[in-house]
Image (cartoon, rainbow, N blue to C red):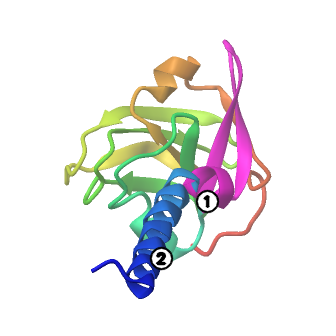
Amino acid sequence: MDTKAGRGLKSVALGLVVALGLGAATLFSAGADAAGTLVTRSGEHRVDIEVADTPDEREHGLMNRQSMPADAGMLFDFGIDRPVTMWMKNTYLPLDMVFMDASGTVTHIAVNAQPLSLDLIESDGPVRYVLELNGGAAARYGLKVGDRLKHPLVGKSSATP
């Protein structure tokens, strides 16, 4: 039976589905904490960056996400330079992990980390930040050790170790 109430519920349900879809699509553009710039030998590359700077945010990271826009990433701030170990538990996206010191200089890159793997990915020395990008992005940007991230957070002491 097609009643006014029934049509109203269908409209609300459709609106909710559209809103959820748009919310997922704009997660990084509207929800990004700040844009950053990867400065490489091939040029400067803008990246929309979501920041994980609390213990809970760092623990959860990109877990359970099914997609991420091509020029987006998540920046983990550990508050101090220290050896860092990452993993891909409950992470469905292949990721490049860019390890950086307090100045934002790249010290190590782990490429195409395998989704859902429990293998440990080490920083190969003390780092302050890790930038997670879609798998293959580091190569697309021409990112190498010694390149740098410019971001409002880099160089500040805002994280809770």
Mark drawn on residue 76: none
Precedes in sequence: disc 2 or disc 1: 2
Please give the name of the residue rendered at 25% of the width and 58% of the height, measured from the top-left corner: 89
User: Dot 1: what SS?
Assistant: strand
- Screen quadrant of the N terminus: bottom left
51 w.r.t. 99: above or below: below
Mark drawn on residue 12: 2
CA neighbours of label 2 inside 10 A, class few (<14), some (14 to 19), many (20+): few
The image shows residue 82 at horizontal and vertical percentages of 52, 57
**Lateral position of residue 78 relative to residue 37, left or right:** left
The image shows residue 5 at horizontal and vertical percentages of 42, 87
Please give the name of the residue rendered at 52% of the width and 51% of the height, measured from the top-left corner: 25
Q: Marks 2/1: CA distance?
A: 33 Å
Q: Report the amino acid beneath label 2.
A: Val
User: Dot 2: what SS?
Assistant: helix
Residue 5 visible to an observer of this rendering: yes
58 w.r.t. 43: above or below: below
The image shows residue 143 at horizontal and vertical percentages of 56, 23
114 w.r.t. 24: above or below: above
Residue 37 in magenta?
yes
Residue 69 in magenta?
no
CA neighbours of label 1 inside 10 A, class few (<14), some (14 to 19), many (20+): many
**Lateral position of residue 102 relative to residue 72, left or right:** right
Q: Report the amino acid beneath label 1.
A: Val
Mark drawn on residue 51: 1
